[in-house]
Image (spheres, rainbow, N blue to C red):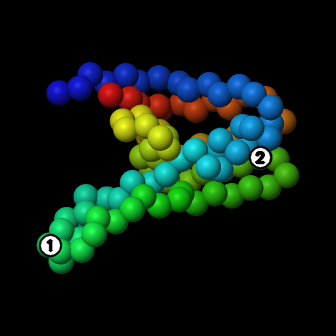
Amino acid sequence: MPNWCVGTLKVRGEKDNIRKFVKEGFELPPTFLQIMTARTQQQEAPESQVPEIEEDKYGVTIKGNDLYIRGTRRMFVSKGFEWDSERNVLVIDDVCAA
């Protein structure tokens, strides 16, 4: 059984790079029900989905629960978050890793 690590993720950089990370760096994995339904119907496993993203002149908001950080196997954010584009730092609370 893996050990769990819980904490805060800080991403620093240029505003355009942080915006790109926020918009492209997260995915919603398929739910257990979706996977089991596909298996019982002998279909291919469902792929991850893109979370709902809202962008305005003040920043970017991501909605969803259990967002996986793209390119990792066991690192996720427990809930959606918001980034204020006036700052060059993105702070995400409730990050978990195994």
Q: Where does residue 37 sit, x and y in percent of width and height? A: 21, 71
Q: Where does residue 9 sit, x and y in percent of width and height? A: 56, 26
Choose between 30 and 86: the one closer to the eye: 30
Looking at the image, which residue is at 69% across and 58% down? 54
Choose between 81 and 38: the one closer to the eye: 38
Q: Where does residue 11 sit, x and y in percent of width and height? A: 65, 28
Please give the residue where the numbered disc 2 appears in the rendered image: 59
Amino acid type of the residue that numbered disc 1 sits on in the rendered structure: Thr
- CA neighbours of label 2 inside 10 A, class few (<14), some (14 to 19), many (20+): some
Choose between 45 and 30: the one closer to the eye: 45
Looking at the image, which residue is at 47% across and 41% down? 71
Task: Report if residue 46 is visible in the image.
Answer: yes
Q: Which residue lies furthest to the bottom in this view?
A: 41
Q: Earlier in the sequence, mark 1 or mark 2?
A: 1
- CA neighbours of label 1 inside 10 A, class few (<14), some (14 to 19), many (20+): few
* Quadrant in the picture for residue 89: top right
Q: In which quadrant will I find the C terminus? A: top left
* Quadrant in the picture for residue 76: top left
Please give the residue where the numbered disc 1 appears in the rendered image: 40
Alpha-carbon span between mark 1 and mark 2: 42 Å
